[in-house]
Image (cartoon, grey):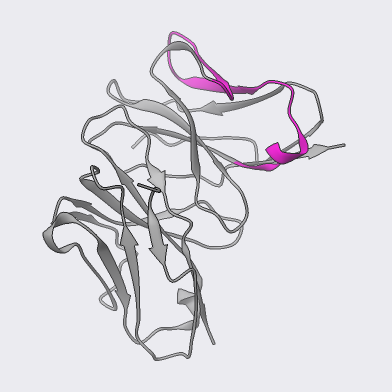
Amino acid sequence: DTGVSQNPRHKITKRGQNVTFRCDPISEHNRLYWYRQTLGQGPEFLTYFQNEAQLEKSRLLSDRFSAERPKGSFSTLEIQRTEQGDSAMYLCASSPPGTDYGYTFGSGTRLTVV
Amino acid sequence: LAKTTQPISMDSYEGQEVNITCSHNNIATNDYITWYQQFPSQGPRFIIQGYKTKVTNEVASLFIPADRKSSTLSLPRVSLSDTAVYYCLAAGGSYIPTFGRGTSLIVHP
């Protein structure tokens, strides 16, 4: 297992198009998180899955955003009708069960909306 | 969620010890303190985690006083490759880890 994998690493899209990102967490990790990060800011929480259940969603996650984690394995984050303000790094993290483990992040997907 | 406060930036020189302090006045009983390092265009990387007193691993030490309202990340003998943004988080397993703006550390030759 090589850690949390995110694809693609970079995505350039035109405003109004839909985009989908994929995250493959560490296999034994049942918790999965999506974050968004813009330049000069820390990562902002978007949503959280425990196994296949989406347990938390940030108010940042407008109705244009949707995330899934079928069968509690990989996860996808879709953004519909992209806007220039969606340009950011989208990070995925996973963690195992328990309260005293750190979170392992992927390298992120850099989205540029033109 | 415990809000954390860190210096926005710090400068140091190669070979020096760097101490970055984080305040978390509203930390909850079940919150752990975790520090992450982030390089440009990469995701944050776990450095160290602790609950109280002192924790040490191969890259850093974490000092947490008895009241747990602050913590200090200590990086011994920094090198140029330690130039990065460092984030302090105070969260328990049932909470969503919330990042602040972090501390941008620049190590000079």
For the residue pair B10 and A97, the one nearer the viewer reads as A97
A7, above or below A56, in the image:
below
For the residue pair A36 and B38, the one nearer the viewer reads as B38
- In percent of width and height, residue A52 lies at 13, 56
- In percent of width and height, residue A3 lies at 39, 48
Instruction: Please check the rendered image and state whether residue B79 is part of the magenta-colored stretch, yes or no.
Output: yes
- In percent of width and height, residue B66 lies at 44, 8
Instruction: Please check the rendered image and state whether residue B5 is part of the magenta-colored stretch, yes or no.
Output: no
Looking at the rendered image, the quarter that the C terminus of chain A falls into is bottom right
Taking the spot 52% from the left edge, 21% from the top edge, the residue there is B71
Magenta extent:
B58-85
User: Position of A99 compared to B49: left or right?
Assistant: left
For the residue pair B26 and A89, the one nearer the viewer reads as A89
Taking the spot 31% from the left edge, 27% from the top edge, the residue there is A100
Please identify the residue farthest to the right as the structure is shown. B109
User: Position of B18 compared to B71: left or right?
Assistant: right
A3, above or below B17, in the image:
below
- In percent of width and height, residue B85 lies at 62, 44
B66, above or below B61, in the image:
above
